[in-house]
Image: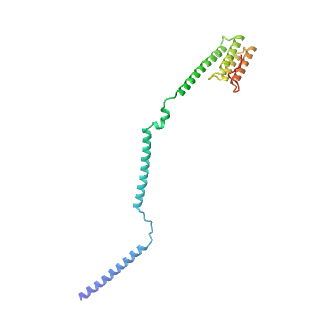
Amino acid sequence: FFFSIFTSLASSTMKVSLAAVSTLACLSGTSAFAPATQPVCNHHSLRLEMTHSRRNVLSQIAVWTAIGTTTASSPSLALETYLTEPTEEFKENERKAMEFRRQQLEIKQKFTTVLTRLNSAECKTEQDIVDALKELRALVVSTGGLPGGLKKEDLIKQVRSKKAKGFWPTNAEIAYQSLLSEIGFQQSPNTEKDLGNPL
């Protein structure tokens, strides 16, 4: 009796096991052929790609660092032109420029002296005014115009300052207009400086 019960239970258990195995096989087969619901992220490939990009960046930094180090260690490559000694021609041109500036300052000082005398209390007669204006005209002729640092407008302003004081005779006005004509002639681009304008 017990043996028949045991045999029946064993048969039932085997059937259940076979059914379970069959079910699992079906499920595994279904999952094997079923399409994936979400994309699979390949972490290994992503890590390789990031590593490759990082190596490219580091290699570029190393190259530019090497270039900067070479330039810094060899400043003569960039400043070679500025480190050379000035040529004799350059020195001569500098000497001439300094000499020209010195002469211009001296000439300007002569103009300033005459203009100061013209506007002073000592220049009170007609002859004093005319003499000062003629002296200014002579300086314009000898200089070939006005010196550097003295504009025509500044000179006219100082002469008119004297004129505004009231005493301005006819001969003074004639001498003043002659001065202005001489300045215009000397500063004209068509003027032959070598010939000049005779007094």
The colour style of the image is rainbow
The reply to whether residue 103 is visible in this rendering is: yes
Looking at the image, residue 89 lies above or below residue 32: above
The reply to whether residue 169 is visible in this rendering is: no
Residue projecting furthest to the right: 170
| x, y percent for residue 5 | 26, 86
Looking at the image, residue 64 lies above or below residue 180: below
Looking at the image, residue 18 lies above or below residue 166: below
The one of 145 and 46 positioned closer to us in this rendering: 145
| x, y percent for residue 181 | 72, 21
Question: Residue sitting at 46 percent across and 36 percent down?
Answer: 76
Question: Residue sitting at 73 percent across and 18 percent down?
Answer: 178
- For residue 173, what is the image quadrant? top right
Q: Which image quarter is the C terminus in? A: top right
Question: Residue sitting at 44 percent across and 49 percent down?
Answer: 60
Number of marks: 0
Is residue 33 left or right of 130 when viewed as pictured?
A: left
